[in-house]
């Protein structure tokens, strides 16, 4: 069965410093992986998506993630944090083994950006 | 294009009351989903519908029922609400050939 583990429940960075949010996945086949962001009291917005094309995926707002099969990881990075990046981030893997896409969410990482 | 819409945005119920959460999408998507979000637990799948007329249980279906009324609409019903169902509920949809989900704005439900 597919699963994802977000290794940090909370991450704090200073504005202007790099962001690293870690995600490991477990999948019996080549997975599709996603990162979503949720700002306080808002819905979920897709940041980026990996579907077996390029292993380095660029998303919105300067975020990118690298798919590393050997490490079963899909970490999210951004070179320079902005105050507006403060939000909760979810790593997601899709599971199509039943013939219909289902999505398994990680437990989330809350990013705090310090001025 | 409104995308995925949900009603109501907020609701307070007493234990034992019933209610239906409504979801509609105007993107002609076949698949629709209901999730609940609780602190520290991410989103957990309650029910999903691969197409009009079909529904399947997800990870946490107990205490809920769903109806896929037509291709656009997918409702979630709580027959006898319990405090454990206090949560934020999200509806989502996607096309079968494109596995990106689109989410509604959520319904914040409190059961007293």
Image: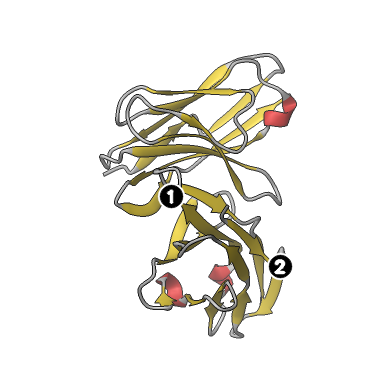
Measured as percent of width and height from the top left, residue A57 is found at: 42, 75
Question: Looking at the image, is A98 positioned above or below residue B77?
Answer: below
Location of residue B112 (image quadrant): top right
At x 61% / y 57%, what residue is drawn? A106
User: In the image, residue B88 lies at what x, y percent?
Assistant: 60, 39
Chain of the residue under the numbered disc 2 shown in the image? A
Local SS, label 2: loop
Please state, as top left, top right, bottom left or bottom right, where the C terminus of chain A lies in the image: bottom right
Give the answer, above or below, for where B64 lies relative to B2.
Answer: above
Q: Which of label 1 and label 2 is nearer to you?
A: 1
Q: Chain of mark 1?
A: A
| In-image side of B9 versus A107 (left or right) | left
Q: Element at badge 1?
A: loop
Residue at the (37%, 78%) spot, across then down: A54
**On the image, numbered disc 2 is attached to which residue?**
A8
Residue pictured at 45% horizontal, 57% vertical: A45
Residue A101, placed above or below residue B89: below
**What residue sits right under mark 1 in the picture?**
A96
Q: Nearer the viewer, residue B95 or B16?
A: B95
Q: Nearer the viewer, residue A104 or A82?
A: A104
């Amino acid at each position: 069965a597919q699963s994802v583990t977000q290794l940090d429940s909370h991450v704090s960075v200073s504005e202007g410093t790099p962001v690293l949010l870690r995600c490991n996945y477990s999948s019996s086949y080549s997975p599709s992986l996603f990162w979503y962001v949720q700002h306080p009291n808002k819905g979920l917005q897709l940041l980026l998506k990996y579907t077996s094309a390029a292993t380095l995926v660029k998303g919105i707002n300067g975020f990118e993630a690298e798919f590393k099969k050997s490490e079963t990881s899909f970490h999210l990075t951004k070179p320079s944090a902005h105050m507006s990046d403060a939000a909760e981030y979810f790593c997601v893997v899709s599971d199509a083994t039943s013939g219909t896409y289902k999505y398994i969410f990680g437990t989330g990482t809350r990013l705090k950006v310090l001025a | 294009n409104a995308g995925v819409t949900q009603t109501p945005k907020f609701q307070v119920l007493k234990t034992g009351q019933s209610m239906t959460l409504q979801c509609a999408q105007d993107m002609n998507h076949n698949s629709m989903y209901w999730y609940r979000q609780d602190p520290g637990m991410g989103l957990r799948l309650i029910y999903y519908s691969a197409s009009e007329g079909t529904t399947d249980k997800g990870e946490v279906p107990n205490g809920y029922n769903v109806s896929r009324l037509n291709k656009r609409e997918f409702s979630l019903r709580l027959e006898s609400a319990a405090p454990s169902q206090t949560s934020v509920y999200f509806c989502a949809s996607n096309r079968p050939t494109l596995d990106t989900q689109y989410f509604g704005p959520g319904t914040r439900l409190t059961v007293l």
